[in-house]
Amino acid sequence: MPIFKKGKKVLWSLIVFVITGFLFLSFSSCKFSTIDRIEETREAMGSYATITVFSDEETGNEAINAAFNRIKEIEDIASVYNENSEASFLNKNGYLDDPSPDFLNLINSSIEYYNITGGSFDITVQPLLDLWSAGELWKETPEVQAQRIEETFPVIGSDKIIVSDDRIEFSVDGMAITFGGIAQGYAVDEAIKIIKGFGIKQALVNISGDLYAMGIKPDGEEWIVELDNPDKSDDANTDIEPLPIFFFTDKAVTTSGNYYRYYDPEGEVGHIMDPRTGYSAGSCISSTVIADTCIDADVLATSVFVLGPEDGMDLVESLDGVEAFIIDSERNLYSSSGLSEYIN
């Protein structure tokens, strides 16, 4: 009997030793990951892109690199400044066979937005941009400007783009497209998809002011977006009322404005053209749009800017899940009916 008890005690000692050793080896082999804020900025799409993620370092860096690679893929097919891009091939030849899925998506989405916005968003505006920039139309008299614009109108209109699954072509010679008002938004959305694929729940992708904020930050706070005051003067006595600060999650926001880029030295001809008139859009200083996707926010910010405060706000109010904040040329402020949801 005593021997049996002693053996049992030894047996339990061995079991405890084995379990303890197993747990020690298990814990020592585990890598405890911490959630860090990882951020990187790179040149992208003619400007700068910043990607912020909350993740462990290894996963976060892999996700950021993959997202930047996805942005580069889209830039390589959509940029009109890259002579090897699909956009440049279409502009040069008037057709494109076997377009990539991304290019086809951009074309089809652009035509859809052209119809939704009544032509205020139009990727075939490129000939007008060329007229005012390289052609220096701003130097001419109003009479010459009107004549040159009228001569250019026959090649303007996304309804002149013919699309099938394996071919895109222009119905009129001399047409040309630009994805300047849609490609960055599309790239932001695609980058967010890549980041989600790594299991990351909180991230922000910002390409030159087109951004999407995903998830609640680890501290429980929403993402904060502050608008730049478009007045050029640094004087505190600005004519514009204090601008709102937006708080949101799982939303995109984009601002369009003519206050940074001009074709003329006097700053009277902005880079956002009204494709319906051929002249620079001038009834707004800026338009900010919040939407469920960045491609929506990107396109609609441009469209609202072109349409002006009244027609632009009517467009916004007709769309689900879209809000807007507009500053018109007289420094008046306009807010859509649901914008207060994003202002604390």
Image (cartoon, rainbow, N blue to C red):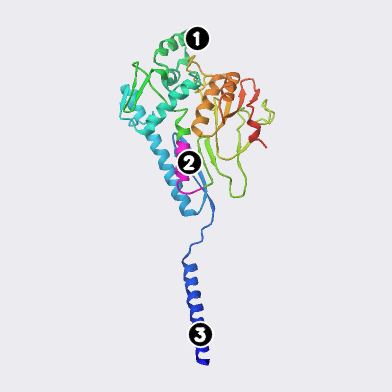
The residue positioned 32% from the left and 27% from the top of the image is 89
Residue with the most extreme bottom position: 2
Q: Which residue is mark 3?
A: 8
Position of 91 relative to 57 (above/below): above
Query: Are the residues tagged 1 and 3 within 8 Å (C-beta)?
Result: no
Q: Is residue 199 within the magenta segment?
A: yes
Mark positioned earlier in the residue sequence (3 or 2): 3
* Tag 3–tag 2 contact (CB < 8 Å): no
> Does residue 158 appear in this view?
yes
Name the residue: 44% across, 10% down.
150
Question: Which quadrant would the C terminus be assigned to in this image?
Answer: top right
Tell me which amino acid carries mark 2.
Ile
**Residue interval drawn in magenta:** 187-200
Nearer-the-camera pick, 65 or 316:
316
- 139 on left or right of 233: left
Please provide percent x and percent y for residue 135. 42, 17
Q: Which residue is mark 1?
A: 142
224 in the magenta segment: no
| Mark linked to residue 260 | none
* Viewer-proximal residue among 79 and 166: 166
Q: CA distance from mark 3 to mark 2?
A: 60 Å
Circle 2 — which element? Answer: helix
Give amino acid for label 1.
Pro
